[in-house]
Image (cartoon, coloured by chain):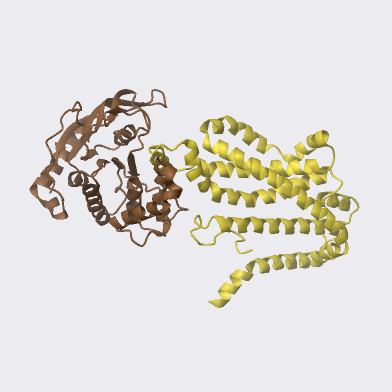
Amino acid sequence: MKWRRALYNASPWITTFAFFVVWEIGCRVFKVPTFLLPTPTDSFKALIEYWPGIWPNAEHTLITTLIGFGIAVVFGVMLGVAVGASPLLYKALNPLLIGFNSIPKVAVVPVLVLWFGIGTVPAVITAFLVAFFPISVNVATGIATTEPELEDVLRSLGASKLDILYRVGLPRSLPYFFASLKVAITLAFVGSVISETVAANEGIGYLMLTASSTFRVPLVFAALFVIAAMGIVMYAVAAAFERRHTTWATRGVDRTPFGSG
Amino acid sequence: MRVASPIVSTAQDAAAFVRVEGASLHYRGGEEGVLALKDTDIAIRRGEFAAVVGPSGCGKSTLLKLISGLNRPSAGRVVVDQTEVKKPLKIVGMAFQNPALLPWRTTLENLLLPLQVVEPHRRQFRRERERYIERARALLAKVGLVGAEDRFPWQLSGGMLQRASLCRALIHDPQILLLDEPFGALDAFTREELWDVLQSLWQEQHFTVLLVTHDLAEAVYLADTVHVFSNRPGRVVYRCNVDLPRPRNADMRFTKLFVDHVHDLRAQISRERVTP
């Protein structure tokens, strides 16, 4: 069964590699023009060739995303705790939150540009706007699903709502919170890159926009690779956090996607 | 050996430790809300083991919430130790069918939870932690959970979880233990084992127990007094003193006296179920 284990561990690499191979072969066999869909090798070549230009932009996007994500975590947790602990707030804020989350954030970027001008600020805000919602929803769910029996046990001992929140609600919501981080960090990238493609003069989104307007399509794909890679790395960081803090929820078994990544 | 005392017939019995006097509870919600309890009278002496049986959904659990002070009655009153109950009592321990242990805490840490919440233990928790841990270990030993201290709830069986839940209800030395069908989800053998565990804990520590159950044999086996509840809205329609000697054991459950008690209760409940 040793090879089985090896196959299991190697499977993410194998599928990723196979994906590029199929893509490469497809492009060559059907002679797809580069300005429509460049082969992976072309894209990687562009990645290496333009690296000095790509990296500062990637760095910029990464920082923008992390700032927006950080704000989303702080705000999302506060909102989630408030909404999860108070049925009144939940009822009162629910329609507003759902409505707000349904708005495509691309539509908000022009407004943000109107308020804050072209540049980093709209990107940070967009990343934040896209990312806070799943965090809030998850934290609120974790807190609101506290067993009523447990609440009775503690309330009969004179525990305040705050005691119950601190002893039960918050620890209970941790696995929900960490699960939401994985979703939120990838969404934050989507947010910042969207904003950069609409209105920025720096960042990976801006780079893609300028590259596509000059038909340097391999460069566009190289930029996409960079975004994907950053997303995977940040996801893995979030997953590692999750694993460290919530072993009780997975009962010691590592079932999280990309758990070993 | 302990012998059951004479019947407590009226809630006016001034000596009773827990007195529920004409209590009704109207839950809000829906068009007219739900009348869960109506004119309920119950008196429980200090140190008595009382049981409440009745058809499902008859407001038995509501009674526990009133006594613990989690809910206030809409009419009537609840008096514990000569004082009317107006807020959570802090001298009760509760256990339910769902053991509801915290999955991120070990058995031992779960037992410490009430001590981190209830006064005066809460104030001294840091200082007295070692002593509390000793107390928790001793209690776990009494219910046969030696070796489970550092295990997590998901590593325990249903019976072990219920034992731990019972310990959590007793760790702060409550004067009243309120049990809401605590053994309802266990298999027959485990359940009977836990009856004996509960009986010996009670005989040792002399707390007052109110056990809500739908298992008549359980009520007769454990209780001094069994109160039969009517259909919703619930109130007490029948009382029965169980005059079996203590400690009770498994063999007693096949004696005529025991079976007669169960029959008697059974007949009362059947009558309740027919007449709405």
Kindly tell me whether residue B43 is visible in this rendering.
Answer: yes
Q: Residue at x 46, y 49 (%)?
A: B126
Answer left or right for A112 relative to A147: right
Query: Residue A87's x, y, as percent?
Result: 51, 33
State the residue in front, A212 or A228: A228
| B131 versus A49 height, above or below | above
Of the 4 image quadrants, the one containing the C terminus of chain A is: bottom right
Query: Residue B4's x, y, as percent?
Result: 13, 41
Q: Residue at x 59, y 32 (%)?
A: A93
State the residue in front, A103 or B91: B91
Query: Residue A138's x, y, as percent?
Result: 57, 44
User: Which chain can be seen in yellow?
Assistant: A
Answer left or right for A63 relative to A241: right
Query: Residue A216's x, y, as percent?
Result: 88, 56
User: Which chain can be seen in brown?
Assistant: B
| A29 versus B51 height, above or below | below
Name of the residue lying farthest toward the left: B256
State the image quarter where residue A81 is shown: top right
